Amino acid sequence: AEAGRRPRVMIAKLSQDGVLVLMHDSGLQRTTNGQGIGGECSMGELAQLDAGAWHSRAFAGENLPTLEALARWCIANHLFLNVEIKPTEGQEEATGRATGELMNRLWPKDAVAPLFTSFKPDSLRGARATAPEIPRGLLVHAFADGTGEAELQTALELGCVAMVLNHGLWTAEYVQRVHAQGLRCSSYTVNDEVEAKRLLDIGTDCIITDRVDLFSPAA
């Protein structure tokens, strides 16, 4: 995508009362001034937390954003969106269902659909149940048996359009296997130009990075 249209990745979790918030960890203590499990707190409790001071003084006082608020901002600014469904343990399917319901209601039908991704197959099943037309991608950190066959079959069973792998897992042979099944090949998290070139050379379709400044728009 062109420079202003790179997909934004948002990580969604459910609050205790069913609001989707953007938070990477299940625990609150690393990135907020709270303690305990975020999924066990109401949105009212989460809204009181400082989610910016851990980063720097300039961000002190920032609240935990909701998926709805950030999705509306992406829509208003014509941005593409990748929603990673990263549930609190035990909320896998419920988080997927809630994400599907929200984005199905919110996202314009004439815009490029968001992509749902998750390490949790049950979350993708939940999203498929409530928003079957929104595409899905299976995130994979490591292969269970070293071959990737089980993960590929899971992605196909879930009706995924892509596999999003820990970048070191991709080989030219596995890219060919995934492409042969009609799926796209994506990688996380690529913050190195040499690795980015390797992935492009073996035919992968996309990289996820948090160092956009290292890459030109053409890359």
Image: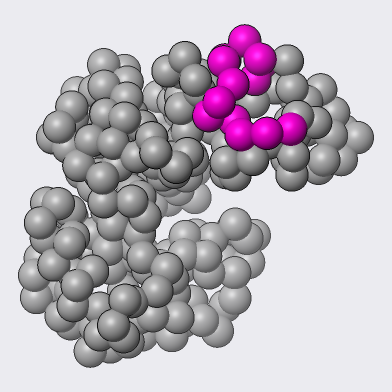
Q: Quadrant of residue 218?
A: bottom left
Q: Is residue 73 visible?
A: no
Would you say residue 204 sits in the magenta stretch?
A: no
Q: Is residue 64 visible?
A: yes
At a point 23% along the width and 69% down the height, the residue shown is 151
Residue 113: x, y in percent? 25, 35
Residue 92: x, y in percent? 34, 39
Q: Quadrant of residue 161?
A: bottom left
* Residue 73 drawn above or below residue 207: above
Residue situated furthest top in the rendering: 44
The magenta region covers 35-47
At a point 27% along the width and 29% down the height, the residue shown is 97
Q: Number of marks in the image?
A: 0
Residue 55: x, y in percent? 81, 42
Residue 49: x, y in percent? 74, 22
At a point 57% along the width and 66% down the height, the residue shown is 215
Relative horizontal placement of residue 158, taking residue 170 as reference (left or right)? left
Would you say residue 42 sits in the magenta stretch?
A: yes
Q: Quadrant of residue 216?
A: bottom right
Relative horizontal placement of residue 52, taking residue 211 as reference (left or right)? right
